[in-house]
Image (cartoon, grey):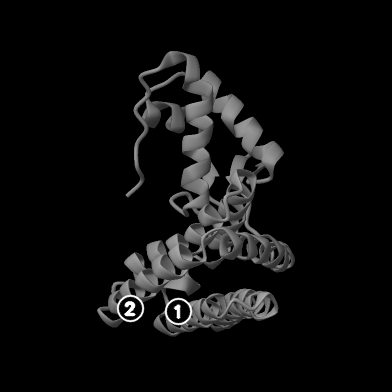
Amino acid sequence: MRKKLVIKNNPTIRKKVYEHVREQILSGQIAPKERLIEAKIAQDIGTSRTPVREALHNLEMEGLIESIPRIGYTVKAISDREAVELWEIRCLIEGLATRWAVEKAPEKLAKELRKNIVRAEEQVSRGNLDVFVELDGQFHETIARLSGGQRLLELAQTLRRYTLMYRLESIYLPDVALRAIEGHKNLLRAIENGDPEEILRAVNAHLDQSKKDTLRYAFEKKERSASEKEKLQ
């Protein structure tokens, strides 16, 4: 169920509307290719259409939505090529974040990641994959936060959420979750060993596996869709 926005501070309406709609898109509450109706969004939020119109324009400039003639705004679906590009960038950003975090707070980093992995394994074993998705995000956010770089944290958060848009369905598969946890374990071992090259290899291997799992699921989904269309013809 989508969260509703309650605006109380008028001077920040435009910013709040933009951030609210953006969050719904990045979290998957508004799905790719879904139509965004200006009047409905304004009614749901309880504001005029002007800040909504401005928010949609800004989101189009950001590349999250697109304007289609005679249809209006729809959420832009991420292509396979764009997804690969995002993972490549994540490897660079998260590799740097991990190195900085190890330099600044190695013991605290290892302790927090260890606790996260234990909780993640418990939740997956119970079938609580929605909780695992939250813990997966927290794992990566912990690294970025302890890196001490605010801009780095913002970049890491944004990139992770963009890739999450693409992998929302695949990440809820048990085998994908287990491989993600294994990747987290390997990265934790590398952090505990303190070898920069081993850490970078672990980051790259984990994110590469995530990319492969997601692209494989996307390919299989397209194949199923094509097969179903053939049956209907």
Q: Amino acid at mark 2?
A: Val
Q: Position of residue 6 (x, y in %)?
A: 34, 28
77 and 230: which is toward the camera: 77
Residue 46 vs residue 22: left or right? Answer: left
**Left or right relative to 103: residue 123:** left
Judge whether residue 70 can be spotted in this image.
Answer: no
Type of amino acid under label 1: Ile
Q: Nearer the viewer, residue 206 or 168?
A: 206
**Contact (Cβ within 8 Å) of mark 2 with mark 1:** yes
Q: Nearer the viewer, residue 154 or 230?
A: 154
Q: Which mark is residue 124?
A: 2
Label 2 and label 1: CA atoms lie apart by: 10 Å
Residue in the image at 40% along x and 17% along y: 9
Closest to the observer, 210 or 98: 98
How far across and down, in percent of the image, does residue 115 sit?
35, 70
Label 2 element class: helix
- To which quarter of the image does residue 55 belong? top right
Q: Reading the chain from its start, which is encountered first: label 2 or label 1?
A: 2
